[in-house]
Amino acid sequence: MILRMSGVAFDALSSPQPCAERARLFDAYLEAAEIYHHAGRRLMVHAGVTGQAEHIRIRDRCERARIIAEDAFRIAERHIAEHGC
Ligand SMILES: [Zn+2]
């Protein structure tokens, strides 16, 4: 699709179009990855310092964050493949 703007040809299909959904999905991934990063750091810092119950609680939070981050990345990749953005 070629548009003419002020006498200049403008190819609307080949021009990069921002995809709001792609940006939203990657924001969700980055947020989940950041939570995972902080949980992992906390796990490392508290290793051998906290009691076993606290260690298990932090480890479980870290594992949940990892799974959420991986899911968010897969969803973003699937969107890109389906949407071609
Ligand atoms: Zn898209």
Image (cartoon, rainbow, N blue to C red):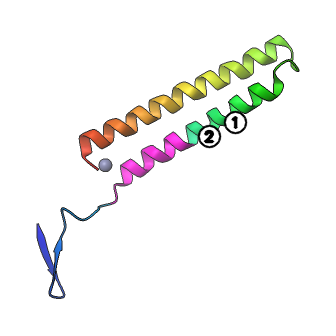
Where residue 49 appears, x then y in whole percent?
A: 88, 21
Q: Quadrant of residue 20?
A: bottom left
- Residue ID for mark 2: 34
What SS does tag 1 mark? helix
Image height of 16 relative to 40, above or below: below
Q: Could you tell me which quadrant the N terminus lies in?
A: bottom left
Where residue 40 appears, x then y in whole percent?
A: 69, 29
Q: Residue at x 80, y 18 (%)?
A: 54
For badge 2, the amino acid type reads Glu
- Side (left or right) of 73 relative to 54: left
Q: Residue furthest right?
A: 49
For badge 1, the amino acid type reads His
Where residue 31 appears, x then y in whole percent?
A: 57, 42
Image height of 11 relative to 52, above or below: below
What SS does tag 2 mark? helix
Q: Residue at x 25, y 45 (%)?
A: 83
**Is disc 2 in contact with disc 1, using a CB cutoff of under 8 Å?**
yes
Q: Per the image, is 54 magenta?
A: no
Q: Residue at x 53, y 25 (%)?
A: 67
Q: Residue furthest left?
A: 1
- Does the Cβ of the disc 1 residue fall within 8 Å of ligand 1? no
Magenta region = 18-30
Q: Quadrant of residue 74?
A: top left
- Side (left or right) of 76 relative to 39: left
Q: Alpha-carbon distance for marks 2 and 1?
A: 6 Å
Q: Residue at x 65, y 25 (%)?
A: 62
Secondary structure mostly seen in magenta is: helix
- Residue ID for mark 1: 38
Q: Residue furthest top?
A: 52
Q: Which mark is residue 4?
A: none
Count of numbered circles in the view: 2
Q: Per the image, is 24 magenta?
A: yes
